[in-house]
Image (spheres, rainbow, N blue to C red):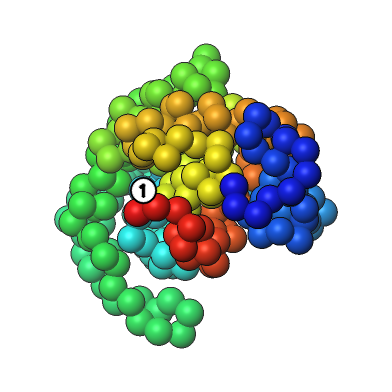
Amino acid sequence: MVGAAGPDLLPGVPIGREDQLLTPAYWKWRCEIGAAEGHDYVTKDGALEDEVAFCLLGGFGIRMEVNEAFFRHLKAAGALTLEAPASESTLLALLEERIEVEGRFHRYRFPKQRARRISDALRMLADFDATSLNDLQFREAICRIPGVGPKTGSWITRNWRGAETVAILDIHVLRAGWYLGIFDRGARLPKDYLALEQKFLEFAKALDVRPAVLDAVMWSDMRIFGSRLASKILPH
């Protein structure tokens, strides 16, 4: 890790200082700020079908603000109930509408794909029983829904169950891990997801922070400025 100082937190990973951007000390400080503000990054209420639909609407290429707006759009239309789920064609029509997002009108980027995935998910969740499953078993079961990979499955598991045994890893968190030196530079998502997740959880334990807070603040800061900063140093 470029420019970091101090003793090693993990072998080859110096702790650095709070004022050194993207160092372990910086991330520990960011987690403390998040915890002090009361962020636990876990859903307090809502139905499982809501969490699944929300996470299916998100992901690569979809800004969080657009994700949230179209989720509210589907909810307002009553399209996400398991008792009377909307058809794929109805979901498609709703996702093809232009709606207001932060004062501007937007279209959803992948309406056909996400309409099909949400329709499949609602059908499968009608018979879904997670009462006997631990968090990792729950994620494995959720990943059987078409379109739900390890990142989306982890996102749903975290939101719905408050799981601290999973991590939500995307390209932003991957770049943070490359920069820190906790991830191998050849590791890629989703191929190496489980191995990267284990390294991330070990890093969170060494920092003595909750994984739920750490991956959230990493995603936020890397999305805003960190990925650009790390990309100047990391080889392409």
Q: Which residue lies at the image location 42% right of the left edge and 65% below the top edge? A: 63
Residue 45, relative to residue 67: is it above or below?
Answer: above
How many numbered discs sit on the rendered protein? 1
Between 162 and 10, the one nearer to me in the picture? 10
Is residue 46 visible to the viewer in this orientation of the structure? no
Asked which quadrant contains residue 100, the reply is: bottom left
* Residue 195 rendering spot, x and y as whole percentages: 45, 26
Q: Quadrant of the C terminus?
A: bottom left
Pinpoint residue 65: horizontal percent, then vertical percent. 47, 67
Q: Position of residue 79 (x, y in %)?
A: 34, 54
Q: Which residue occupies 59% across, 60% down?
A: 221
Name of the residue lying farthest toward the bottom: 103
Closer to us: 49 or 206: 206
Q: Quadrant of residue 92?
A: bottom left
In which quarter of the view is residue 210 placed? top right
In the displayed structure, would residue 165 be above or below residue 77?
Answer: above
Instruction: Please name the amino acid that badge 1 sits on.
Output: Leu
The residue tagged 1 is 56
Q: Nearer the viewer, residue 51 or 188?
A: 188
Residue 64 relative to residue 119: left or right: right
Secondary structure under the numbered disc 1 in the rendered image: helix
Q: Is residue 81 left or right of residue 12?
A: left
